[in-house]
Image (tube, helix red, strand yellow):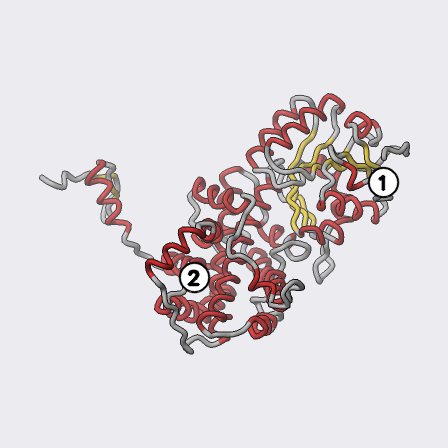
Amino acid sequence: MTQNIELADIGLIGLGVMGINLAKNFAEKGFSVIGHDSSPSHAMNEPAIYVHSQLKDFVRNLAKPRKILFLLPAGQTVEEVIQSLVPYLEPEDLIVDAGNSHFEDTKRRSQELATKKINYLGLGVSGGEDGARNGASFMAGGKPDIFENIKPFLEAAAARDPDNNICAKRLGDAAEVGHFVKMVHNSIEYAEMQLLSEVYSQFAEIKGYNNEDISKAITSWRNELEGSFLSDVTSKILKTIDNLTDAPLIDMIEDIAEQKGTGKWGTVSGIDLGVPAPTLYEGVSSRFISQCKPDRITASKIYRPVLHKNNALSTDTIRRAFLAAKICAYAQGFQLLKIASLKYSWNLKLSDVAEVWKAGCILRGNILNKIVEAFDRKASLTNLLLDTDLSEELKRSIPELRLVVSEAALCGLPLAAHSASLSYFDSFIKSKLPMNIIQAQRDFFGSHGYRRIDRSGTFHTSWED
């Protein structure tokens, strides 16, 4: 219910799971917090949060300049709330969109609100419910003076890495930077999740391991470069028993994966910017093909696939192959950040991006230490495959990835993300690719011209004369 209180430090709009837990986090750190939600009944029993059902009352009870966080679904909902909220705001008030909005929407909204002298910035938040409550990773943009208004809140509520560094940073001046970085984070997340699902399938279908054995194998990676929050999650999932059937819960879950769109946005941005990101794409595409369940069932009856088990793949081979594929996925994601930063003049410091992901977020894992070191050594690094340390890791691990992909192909086991990483690696390290054929084809049927290796200029041939 609405209560009369002293002016609050910060207000949250959208009191779902993330909003409620972030509000509790702020309150626990000593900030006075109020909330607004169109359906606030579920938040009424939170003593630390004063909930206003009317926007006008919500705004009136915030200290100036007002600081308002959105925890709203991306898209039309954000547009509608902005339209409803703006009449009550004043110059220098700040709206922070902490949902998963598309970065181009954030840029447009920031520019539109700037005409009213209202500040607006996008905030990438990762960590889920637990992160919101106990310490998340915050990826922000915005000019320094604007960011300063929200900085104390974010730093108080953020996770801290093992070295006690705060995982909340302003990554660039543009309002949309935080949402772009979060979008790429989610694209890499999709890829790593897909890679781990393929690790699971190798253990289960080629080696014949049971869920407990797979869990133990993945748990043993915890202190290795492969270790991460997602690998820990996978290990725990495999040990969980279904309380309805007493069977492993993973065996009761239908093999159809859903998504909310951020991974797709990342791959589209890669295409728009001309950045090769096949492993990130397969993280999305594999979810698409999983949704073709009726057709997959029909196809399985037509083709009657037989999976051949073999002992060629050791546990260590699977581990090292996963690492190689994962490094390639991260290389694609960070190259996407690099190219976007150059195109949009964001001046991203990529070591800061890796730092802010080291705790609280879904991607937190041991590999990020190597990535921070790589960009600290050479801030201008264009691709992680060119780093001295990571290239040594790849030289050791790529043969294992090659073995895993080839054996899986012979066994009839799809490894879309592993295969994409290997093809990416093999293409990236070749000084000469067969693209001369494609350029000649383009010139043949479209007169697009081609460049020669022995002289400058653009040439065209009448191929059938």
What is the distance, in whole Å, between disc 2 and disc 1 at their CAs? 50 Å
Residue 340 seen by the camera? yes
Q: Residue at x 86, y 46 (%)?
A: 30
Mark 1, residue position: 32
Residue 366 seen by the camera? no
Q: Amino acid at mark 1?
A: Ser
Q: Which of marks 1 and 2 precedes in the sequence? A: 1
Q: Position of residue 365 (x, y in %)?
A: 61, 61
Query: Splitting the image into 4 quarters, where does residue 234 fall?
Result: bottom right
Direction front: furthest residue: 245
Q: Quadrant of the C terminus?
A: top left
The answer to whether residue 82 is left or right of residue 49 is: left
Above-or-below relation of 193 to 24 = below
Q: Residue at x 84, y 37 (%)?
A: 50
Q: Along the line of sight, which residue is nearer the eye, 102 or 118?
A: 102
Q: Amino acid at mark 2?
A: Leu
Q: Residue at x 69, y 30 (%)?
A: 119
Q: Position of residue 188 (x, y in %)?
A: 53, 53
Query: Splitting the image into 4 quarters, where does residue 361 fall?
Result: bottom right
The answer to whether residue 286 is left or right of residue 128 is: left
Above-or-below relation of 74 to 412 = above
Above-or-below relation of 223 to 145 = below
Q: Residue at x 58, y 32 (%)?
A: 107
Q: Position of residue 422 (x, y in %)?
A: 40, 61
Query: Splitting the image into 4 quarters, where does residue 399 fall?
Result: bottom left
Mark 2, residue position: 415
Q: Which mark is residue 216?
A: none
Q: Kindly check if marks 2 and 1 are in contact, taking CB atoms under 8 A apart as contact.
A: no
Q: Position of residue 79 (x, y in %)?
A: 63, 29
Identify the secondary structure beneath mark 1. loop
